[in-house]
Image: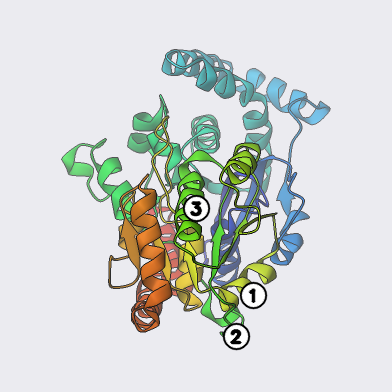
Amino acid sequence: MNSKNNKIAYILSQFPETHETFILRETIELKKNKIDIQLFSLKKCKDKVIHPQALEFITQTHYSALISINVIKAILYFIYIRPLECLGLFIHLIKSNISSIESLIKSIVIIPISLYYAKLMMDLGITHIHAHWATIPTTNALIISKILNIPFSFTAHAWDIFLPNPMLKEKVQQAEFVATCTSYNKKYLDSLLNYKENDKIILNYHGIDFDTLPEINKNIEDNLIFSIGRLCEQKGFPYLLEACAILRDQGYQFKCIIVGEGPDRKAMTTQIELLELQEYIVLSGMKPQSYIFDMFNKARMFVLPCIIAKNGDRDGIPNVMIEALAMCTPVISTTVSGVPEIIQNNITGITVEPRNSQQLADAIIGLLNNPDTAKAFVKNGRKLVEEKFDIRKNIGELVSIFIDRAHL
C-alpha cells in the first residue's frame, strides 16, 4: 500500500492525551494499515492516567523542549540555508495573528520547535504533514510545510474552529485537505472556501474498534446515572446537577457518577453542597477505560448535557457517546453541535434543549420509568454506530484519503 515509502508526520498538541482516545485509536489503525506515520508532540504527557495502548507509542513519539542545543542548531541551520523564508514566515505570523495577543504569542513561541521538527522531518524523509486540531498544531504544520515545501493537512474537531482562530481561513485554504468529524463542522468549514474547492473538506467520523470492546454483560445497578467528561463549561454538568435535584425532590432514589477532572471541579463541588446532593452525586476523578466500560454495563443510562460555552467552545460528537451506544447504554444529551448526528431524538436516544434542567430531568425520569423505550433506543443506537462509527471502516476511508491526497 505504501510502495513509494512515503512518510507522514502526525503533529499533536499532547500525546498521549487521556481524553483523546479517538487519536490513539486512529494511530493504531493507521499503523495496522501499514501507513508509515511519525508522531510529533508539542507537549510531553502530563496525564496521571495513561491508556495501556498508548504506552508503546510514547517511546516512538518525538518530543522537544522549547529551547535546547538541538533546537538552537535547527534554528541556525534554517536561518543559514533559508534566511528569507524564515524572516518572511516570522513577519507573516505576526501580521496574521495581530488581532489576538494569545494566538500571536503562541504562534511566535512555537517557531523554535517548528524549526527543530522541520529538521527532524527532513532527516526522516517526511513527505506529508498532518495535524490534529486547527489551532497551534496546524500552525506548526503550516510553518514546517512552508520551510520544507511539502504539503500539509489537518483534522478539525470542534472548539478549535469555533473559538477565535485568526489563521483558520488561511489554514483551510492552504491545506491539501481538511478532515472533520461532524457534518456540523463540515458545513462551517465549507463556508470558508470558494465553491470550486468544495471537495477539500472531508467528513470522517471517529470510530470504535468493536473487536476490542469488552463483553456486553449488563449488571444494572438500580437507577445508576453515568457521565464522563472534562469538568468544564461546555459539558453542561451544572444542568445535570440541577436535574438530579429535581429527581431527588420528586422522590427518586438514584446515584449519579461523573468521571473526569477539570477547572470546574470546585464550582461543581460547591453546587452539590448547596443542592444537598452529597448522597446522590459522586465526582470520581479520572478513571481508566476498563472502569468506564464496566460502568457502561452497570448504568441505567449515560447523560451528557452539552452546551455552547459563553466563549463559543463546544463539543463535536463526544467519543463517549459512541462508546455508550456501542455498549448498549441509553444516552441522553442535547441538540448542540454534532450531537444530533449520533443521538437522534426518540430513535437512538433523547436530546433536549441545552441549558434546560427541567427537560433533562423529564428525559431521565422517562427512561427510568420506561425500560422498553430504553431497549428500543439501545437497539437503534448500536445499529447506528455499527453503520457509521466502525473505526476500521472510517480509518479505511482516511487511508484512501491519504493515498489520494498525500500521494502515498
Q: Earlier in the sequence, mark 1 or mark 3?
A: 3
Residue denoted by label 2: 215
Distance of label 2 from label 3 (alpha carbons):
33 Å
Q: Mark 1: few, some, or many residues within 10 Å (few <14, many ≥20)?
A: some
What amino acid is found at the position of numbered circle 3 in the picture?
Answer: Ala
Q: Position of residue 27 (x, y in %)?
A: 59, 61
Q: How far apart are marks 1 and 2 (CA)?
A: 9 Å
Local secondary structure at mark 3: helix
Q: Is mark 2 on a helix, strand or loop?
A: loop
Residue 35 quadrant: bottom right
Q: On the picture, is 156 further left or further right than 106? A: left
Is any part of residue 1 visible from this angle?
no
- Front: mark 1 or 2: 1
Q: x and y percent of residue 371 in the render? A: 40, 81
User: In the rendering, which numbered label is found on residue 294?
Assistant: 1
Q: Residue at x 63, y 39 (%)?
A: 270
**Which tag, 1 or 2, sits closer to the chain's start?**
2
* Between 181 and 154, the one nearer to me in the picture: 181
